[in-house]
Amino acid sequence: YFPPHGEPRAFALDDGTGLYREYAPAAADDAKDATEWPFSQAHIAYLDLVMADASSARRYDAALADIRAAQQLYWANTSATGRPGYLSRVVAPLGQGDDLYYDDNLWVGLADVQHHRFRGDIASLERARAVFELIRSGWSTDADLPSPGGVRWTQKADNGDRNTVSNMPAAQLGLRLHQITGERAYLDDALRFYRWTNAVLQRPDGLYHDHLKRDGTVEKTVWTYNQGVPVGVNVLLWQATREARYLAEARRIAAASTKRLTIERLGR
């Protein structure tokens, strides 16, 4: 909820940190601060508002600066792979951090790319690069796993899931960085993430399952975001390569999504 003065009244903690609560109204046993994923979505919402038009830019620019500063309260200088990244909870001294999720980091990396393309600032580009290095470090190298490869969903030791949402947005971030920098390695990695997801998690009709478990079981829920991101990835691949098959694939996934994700189904 974005009221006229630019602060979400229901969720803002109003304690000078720029952080939000996860639920409103908050229950007595809720954590004080929102986890990284919903916070990142508020960050992206402000970015979209500022980019909408000149009047929105004036109205929400200060709030965007505040939420981008607060976003860094989740940043840890190292992780289980040795790479820095955003943890699922705020870090010390305001919190104790928590596990790292690769999809959480990808949403922020993509927001940094968006901010860089809008404002041209180098800091946002460098942070997006750092996030991509983290994602590279999350590629599974265990040759004994079913369908070796793929970016894991999380660094949690007890979770070996490899998800559409930790691989297709990785391809999207790599393609955006390739567009900006011209570096071939970003395109190569994007294709690696893309091809693994297609081989392991894409259905014959073009839609995508959610994830592959460590034991080889596929979790087959069809989520909207797992269809939308691949559409965008294929469009970016078409822009990068001018190969018509990618644009055709984007259209195929979009058509299958329109057929499957109807109002009647989503309302259940």
Image (cartoon, helix red, strand yellow):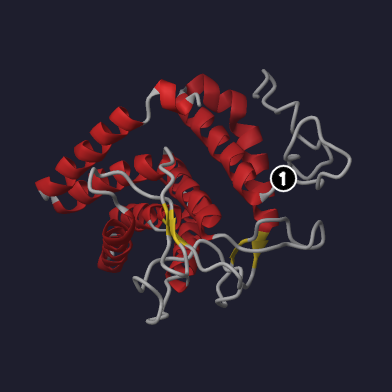
> Is 17 situated left or right of 66 in this image?
right
- Residue at the image position 62 percent from the left and 42 percent from the top: 38
The amino acid pointed to by label 1 is: Ala
- Asked whether 268 or 248 is in front, the reply is 268
Residue 155 position, x and y percent, is 57, 68
- Residue at the image position 25 percent from the left and 44 percent from the top: 206
- Residue at the image position 66 percent from the left and 56 percent from the top: 88
- Quadrant location of residue 27? top right
Tag count:
1
Residue 251 drawn above or below residue 233: above
Residue 267 position, x and y percent, is 49, 24
Badge 1 density bin: few <14, some 14–19, many ≥20, Cα 10 Å: many
- Asked whether 106 or 111 is in front, the reply is 106
Give the residue furthest to the right: 28
- Residue at the image position 47 percent from the left and 31 percent from the top: 51
> Is 136 situated left or right of 71 in this image?
left
The local secondary structure at tag 1 comes to: loop
Residue 81 drawn above or below residue 19: below
| Residue indicated by mark 1 | 34
- Quadrant location of residue 219? bottom left
Residue 185 position, x and y percent, is 29, 69
Residue 31 position, x and y percent, is 81, 48
Residue 3 drawn above or below residue 193: above
> Is 26 situated left or right of 131 in this image?
right
Quarter of the figure with the N terminus = top right
